[in-house]
Amino acid sequence: MSERDHSSYHEHVLDAADVCNSCHRVIRVKRLDPTRGGLADEEFEATFERRRQTTEIGYGPADSASNVKGVFCDRCGTESPYDRPWDDAEEAVSDDRFRELIQTTIRTLEYKGVTLHREDFARHALQQRRDDEHVDDCLGAATEAAIVAAVARGDFDGDADHAPDTEAHEVLST
Ligand SMILES: [Zn+2]
C-alpha cells in the first residue's frame, strides 16, 4: 500500500483544536491574540472561545458552579475536541453517521478556507467506505481528491458541468 497523504484532513479536522473529533463540526472560534505561542494546555482557553452554534455550557456536580462549568459539543456531549466515543476501525459507524460526517467535514474544510469539489468529496468517501476503509482513511482520501478536483476543474461553486452522481448528490442535499 502506498503512503497516503491526508495532511489537509489531519491539519484542518483531526488535529485541529477547534473541531470536534467526534462530529467534525467547528466548535471553537480562534481568537486573534498577538501574544499567542503554542497550543499548550494552559494556553488553550486563552486562544479559543466556544462557538455558540455548536456548543453548550454544561454544569457538573460540585460545591461551586464556577468549578464545574464546561463547554460541551451540543451534538456529542464531549468536552474536549479530541474526544471521540466511536472507533473508526469498527462497524459502529452507521451509514447515516458516515453521511453526516461527510457533510460536516465538507463544511468544516470550507469554513477553514479549503477549496474543494463537494460532489467529488462525497463520491470518493462513499466509494472508499464501500471498500471497507476506515472512516478517517475514507475522509482523508476524499479531502485530497476533492481538493485536486477543484483545482483541476477550476470549478469552485458546484457540479454544473458534469453528470451528477446520484448517491453523492443525495448525501449533499439532505
Ligand atoms: Zn461533536
Image (cartoon, rainbow, N blue to C red):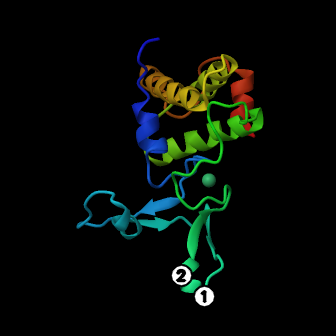
Give the residue at mark 2: 67
In this view of the protein, can residue 121 be seen by the observer? Answer: yes
- Does the CB distance between marks 1 and 2 fall below 8 Å? yes
Element class at badge 1: loop
Rendered residue at 72%/30% (across/down) = 91
Residue at x 63%, y 28% (from the top left corner): 122
Q: Is residue 160 visible?
A: no
Q: At x 57% / y 46%, what residue is drawn?
A: 24
Is residue 131 or residue 163 the one in the foreground?
Answer: 131
Of the pair 115 and 102, the residue shown nearer to us:
102
Which residue is situated farthest in the bottom direction here?
64
Left or right placement of residue 143 versus residue 31 in this view? right
User: Where on the picture, by quarter, is residue 105?
Assistant: top right
Amino acid type for the residue under numbered disc 2: Asn
Q: Which mark is residue 171?
A: none
Q: Residue at x 58, y 32 (%)?
A: 118
Residue 138 % position (x, y): 58, 26
Query: Measured from the top left, where is residue 8 in percent x and y?
Result: 42, 35
Local secondary structure at mark 2: helix
Q: Does residue 145 appear to the left or right of 96 in the view shown? A: left
Q: Report the residue marked by disc 1.
A: 63
Q: Nearer the viewer, residue 98 or 147?
A: 98
**Residue 113 rendering spot, x and y as whole percentages:** 43, 44
> In terms of image quadrants, where is residue 154?
top left
**Number of other residues with Cα within 10 Å of mark 2, as a class: few under 14, some 14 to 19, many 20 or more:** few
Lateral position of residue 98 relative to residue 114, left or right: right
Is the residue at mark 2 in contact range of ligand 1, meaning its CB lies under 8 Å from it? no
Placement of 67 over or under 105, stated as above or below: below
